[in-house]
Amino acid sequence: MARRSKIHVGLEIGTSKTCMVVGEVKPDSAVKILGIGVTKTAGVRKGEIYDFPQARACLKDALVKAEDASDVEIGSVFLAVSGAHIQGINNRGTYRLPEGESTVAPEHVQEARDIARDVHIPQDNVYLHTIIRKYWLDGLEHGTSPVGLFGKTVESDFHIVHGIGNRIQNSIKLVREMPLEVDDVVFSPIATAQMALDREQRERGALVIDIGGGTTDYALYLDGAIAASGCIPVGGDHVTNDIHLVTGLPFSKAEKLKIIEGDASADPARSVGMAKLIDDRGFAEVEVRRSILNEVIRQRLEETLRLVAQRLPTGSIEAIGSGIFLTGGTSLMRGFSELAFDIFARDIYRPETPEISGVQASFKDPHYATAIGLIRYAQILETERAAPPGLFGKVGRLFWPFGK
């Protein structure tokens, strides 16, 4: 029977924006963006909901816009979540075959997997993802399960993502009050990486940094597998607030000045003269020394990128062969790529999405990288459904402890 196209919807409830993307996955695996619904977010701080009614109104507005743009009645979404409470850790499980058994059986591999996933997390936390990284058999690395091979010791290495259950549940509750179903819950940088990186880039080593209004998410891939992920509760809004504090400008004008005149690089030639905002009559409404403005921007963004670097495994930056991939609205800041290069000493890129088509040219905007990545995530999940659960967890199993 011929395969049919499948509609998936990605939803990101961010600090600055609420974004819903409707995508069609065609039988040949090509993705077409049918529509995007975006609205300015209220009620969310550092990726977490603090004013439920305001956040609900914003989500409703984004839903209406997405349905109008795509001409699709939306019933369910893939939901991205973020926040400093979400952490990614690696853990390895080791299982020695019983005496007299020399061939690896499925139950031996499962034992190693269960041991690897049996990590202690805080009582209020729940598991979001358990992603297999590598297997080892008698110390030799294997990219796939070693079932059927001769050996004595099986090891499995997992990347485990967990976060505070109530905060994740609040995001799910918000979606269900639309009312919409939640197909799956995905840690934002893992979703973003689905759009930002291809297989070769993951194999060579790549770091995705998604810097939005209230958070900076990151995901590191080495040798084709995820090696680290996390969230730092700092983003573009903190840069704007720094400008506000230093200059005394209202927050709205500080934001506008940052976007129009700011530069994050350390190039002294870009910090000469005055940065100005011109009013409707053509007069300078705001004037700030460009050197002061750029120094404030650079200091905050440099601190943020160095925090990301500090959280990566020792020696991993040197192992990045493909480069650093920047997404998120704040990544559009003038001079940000130069700043990132100064810190990481690796090639800096903005992800390209040549295999995605759509009537809206804005789908390539880095503001939408996470929501579009959710469409790719959904596509991968479709191909995994025939196999036992392993790579990703459905929302129905989200709060079940392992082994249950």
Image (cartoon, helix red, strand yellow):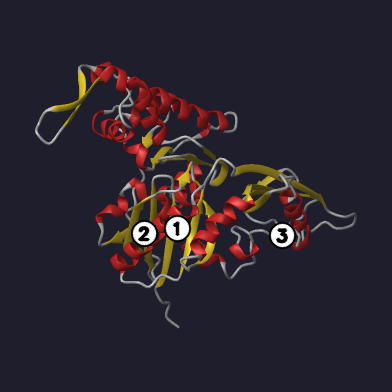
Q: Is residue 279 left or right of residue 152?
A: left
Task: Residue 286 in the image: state x and y as whole percent.
Answer: 21, 26
Q: Nearer the viewer, residue 92 or 85?
A: 85
Q: Which residue is mark 3?
A: 147
Return the disc, 2 or 1, that comes first in the chain's sequence.
Answer: 1
Q: Residue furthest bottom?
A: 1
Q: Is residue 34 above or below residue 228?
A: below
Q: Is residue 356 left or right of residue 167?
A: left
Residue depicted at 64% across the width and 64% down the height: 389
Q: Residues within 10 Å of mark 2 (few under 14, many from 20)?
A: many
Q: CA distance from mark 3 to mark 1?
A: 48 Å
**Label for residue 157?**
none
Q: CA distance from mark 2 to mark 3?
A: 47 Å
Residue depicted at 74% across the width and 57% down the height: 109
Amino acid under label 2? Answer: Ala
Q: Nearer the viewer, mark 3 or mark 1?
A: 1
